[in-house]
Amino acid sequence: MTVAPFMSTQETDNGISFSSKKKELLDSATLSRFKDAFDDDARAALAEAKRDHHNFGQGGIPIYFWFIFLFFAYDDIFEYLKSPFFFYPLLVIGGGLGFVFSMGGGSAITGVLLPMIRHSINMGIRKTGLGF
């Protein structure tokens, strides 16, 4: 059985003539071994792509965990904000954002930053599969 036939060429005085002899490149056992190895590699690549897409087994924290964490730890978060080490930097950042808005630079924040934040939140919700 010829698996991968090809025709050989020969140059003559009249031009190139094609020989009708078929040669076998791979036997059927080698071909089936290559096909099986390719199928195994393709299945492994597909499983890895699905695992990366769904963020399973990579040590990533699912987004719903953060909602549960905020629900149970909101009082501790407010306690941290009472500390000047956390409150003053947030106060400076908030003052800077207020200054930017008062000087007319709010369109840069609302036009660029807020859509990026909204997109990040939407992607996180899609990864959880909650279906909002």
Image: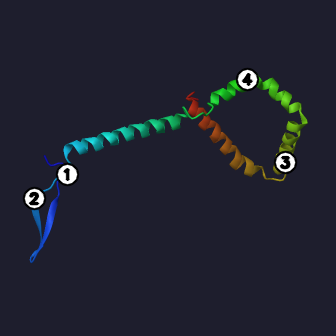
Residue type at the position of mark 1: Ala
Q: Is mark 4 on a helix, strand or loop?
A: helix
Residue type at the position of mark 3: Gly
Q: Which mark is residue 71?
A: 4
Q: Residue 4 carries which label?
A: 1
What is the count of numbered marks? 4
Mark 1 packing: few (<14 Cα in 10 Å), some, or many (20+)? few
Q: On the rendered structure, is 54 left or right of 101? A: left
Q: In which quarter of the image is residue 66?
A: top right
Q: Do the residues labelled 1 and 3 touch (CB within 8 Å)?
A: no
Mark-to-mark CA distance, 1 and 3: 70 Å
Q: Which residue is drawn at 78% across and 53% down?
A: 105
Earlier along the polypeptide chain: callout 1 or callout 2?
Answer: 1
Q: Which of 44 and 26 is in front in this view?
A: 26
* Image height of 130 relative to 97, above or below: above
User: Residue 28's spot in the image, x, y percent?
Assistant: 20, 43
User: Residue 129's spot in the image, x, y percent?
Assistant: 55, 29
Q: In which quarter of the image is residue 128?
A: top right
Q: Which dot, 2 or 3, sits closer to the camera?
A: 2
Q: Do the residues labelled 3 and 4 touch (CB within 8 Å)?
A: no
Q: What element carries label 1?
A: loop
Mark-to-mark CA distance, 1 and 2: 12 Å
Q: Are marks 1 and 2 in contact (CB under 8 Å)?
A: no
Q: On the rendered structure, is 7 left or right of 67? A: left
Q: On the rendered structure, is 56 left or right of 46? A: right
Q: Which dot, 1 or 3, sits closer to the camera?
A: 1
Q: Is mark 2 on a helix, strand or loop?
A: strand
Q: Mark 3 points at which residue?
A: 96
Q: Residue furthest top?
A: 72
Residue type at the position of mark 4: Phe
Q: Mark 2 points at which residue?
A: 21
